[in-house]
Amino acid sequence: MLLSRNSPLRPKKKPLVKRPWTDVQSKPSVTSVSKKKPKILSAAVKPKTAAKKPTKARKLPPPKSRKALPIRETLERLREAYPDAHCELDHRNAFELLAATILSAQCTDVRVNMVTPELFRRFPTPLAMSEAPLEELEELVRTTGFFKNKAKSLKGMATAIVTRHAGEVPRTLEELVELSGVGRKTANVVLGNAFGIASGVVVDTHVSRISQRFGWVKGGSAEAIERELNEMIPRADWIMTPHLLIFHGRRVCKAPTPRCEECFLFDACPRREVK
């Protein structure tokens, strides 16, 4: 027999009762799964280093494959090019040449030749110059540079010639270098050009520069270069060689910018096109 939903004979459903959770039956915990982010391996970072300063471009020396110019052949070619090579300091005697050479230190021969005429007009002899007022000498040689030192050297040199050499310029290297303001270069100039005595090759800035460019010497002090040149150049050429090199240095093989394109030794020079 079918019972209706509202029939009193139909059994009623018991209501559901919510129980509290006990220790025995614990509440299920929901554990959150933490998603770890994968580590991204970054490229190794190099420690910063101080930036290097740019280095200057290194100037390469001229080619050294060519041999040094042969001395005898070179001197012959220089003689052909400069048949009138000579000492360009104006002078009439050994005393004037000695004084002019002292004044030529750190000064051009042209400037010295502008000063010496009046200097020698007033003080033509060692005795006259030894008695000259120092201030007057300074004024006369002012334009040659270092005029105070040069005036003292002139007066000291003249005084020594009067007191120790009877008023005559000595004719030996040893005696000359004892005079005030006189070194080996000045002594060699005077001995060679005033007396014709070959005491050594005169080494000035031109001789030093060109003998190195020709490959004759490696450099060093003037005394060292003189020793080398004295050994390789015949003694008969000691006096003339400096004049030839100085003429060539002033006209062609100049210090800052040599005129290699005009040089008659260009074909064989080991330092051609040197800068």
Image (cartoon, helix red, strand yellow):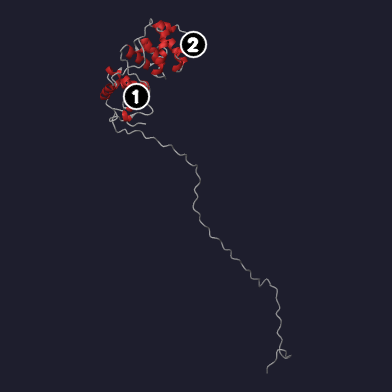
Side (left or right) of 146 relative to 35: left
Q: Mark number for residue 251?
A: 1
Query: Compared with residue 171, is residue 273 higher up or lower down, i.e. above or below?
Result: below
Looking at the picture, tell me which residue is in the foreground, 270 or 85.
85
Type of the residue with mark 1 = Arg
Image location (x, y in percent) of residue 34: 58, 63
Residue drawn at (46%, 11%) of the image: 137
- Local SS, label 1: helix
In the displayed orientation, state which residue is furthest to the top.
166
* Res 231 seen here: yes
> Around disc 1, counting alpha carbons within 10 Å, would you say few (fewer than 14), some (14 to 19), or many (20 or more)?
few
Q: Which residue is label 2 attached to?
A: 135
Query: Compared with residue 164, is residue 60 higher up or lower down, i.e. above or below?
Result: below
Q: Which comes before the other along the chain, label 1 or label 2? A: 2
Numbered circles on residues, count:
2
Q: Mark number for residue 36?
A: none
Image location (x, y in percent) of residue 198: 30, 15
Residue drawn at (27%, 17%) of the image: 236
